[in-house]
Image: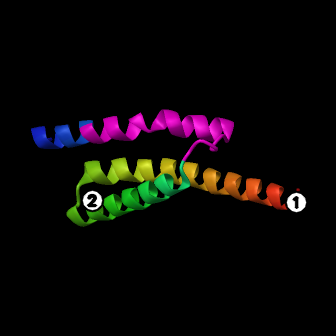
Amino acid sequence: MTTIEILGFTSAFLTTFSFLPQAIQVIKTKETESLSLAMYSIFTLGVACWLVYGLVKQDSAMIVANMITLVLSSCILFIKIFNDMKIKRARLLE
């Protein structure tokens, strides 16, 4: 493994796992009221694009990091959408 590959994997590890505490908290508590739906939608789309880019470039650090981040951000996004829909339904029934 080259020095640049080690740097790539280290960077991928740090940025991906910095996202983990937020994902764990949302998955455990299901609390998403303070999260921006637009931000998580754009972020998840961006991560998916980075994953495709990594696949095209055949960059394993980029592929692994973005696969993990895509799973985590998708979980948060789906919980956020579900919660927002539940709140809207409750307001309509009031």
Residue 61 % position (x, y): 27, 48
Within 10 angstroms of label 2, few (less than 14), some, or many (20 or more) residues? some
On-image quarter of the N terminus: top left
Query: Secondary structure beneath disc 2?
Result: helix
Q: Dominant secondary structure of the magenta stretch?
A: helix
Look at label 1 and name its amino acid.
Answer: Leu
| Residue pointed to by mark 2 | 54
Look at label 2 and name its amino acid.
Answer: Gly
- Give me the disc on residue 93: 1
In this view, the residue farthest toward the right is: 94
Magenta span includes 82: no
On-image quarter of the C terminus: bottom right
Within 10 angstroms of label 1, few (less than 14), some, or many (20 or more) residues? few
Residue 37 % position (x, y): 55, 54
Q: Residue at x 34, y 59 (%)?
A: 51
Residue nearer the viewer, 57 or 50: 50
Residue nearer the viewer, 90 or 25: 90
Q: Earlier in the sequence, mark 1 or mark 2?
A: 2
Could you give the CA–CA distance between mark 1 and mark 2, rounded to whole angstroms?
Answer: 46 Å
Residue nearer the viewer, 72 or 45: 45
Q: Residue at x 47, y 37 (%)?
A: 20
- Report if residue 2 is visible in the image: no
Query: Secondary structure beneath disc 1?
Result: helix
Residue 47 lies in what quarter of the image? bottom left
Residue 3 lies in what quarter of the image? top left
Q: Which mark is in front, 1 or 2? A: 1
Give the mark count: 2
The span picked out in magenta is 11-35
Position of 58 with respect to 49 (left or right) is left
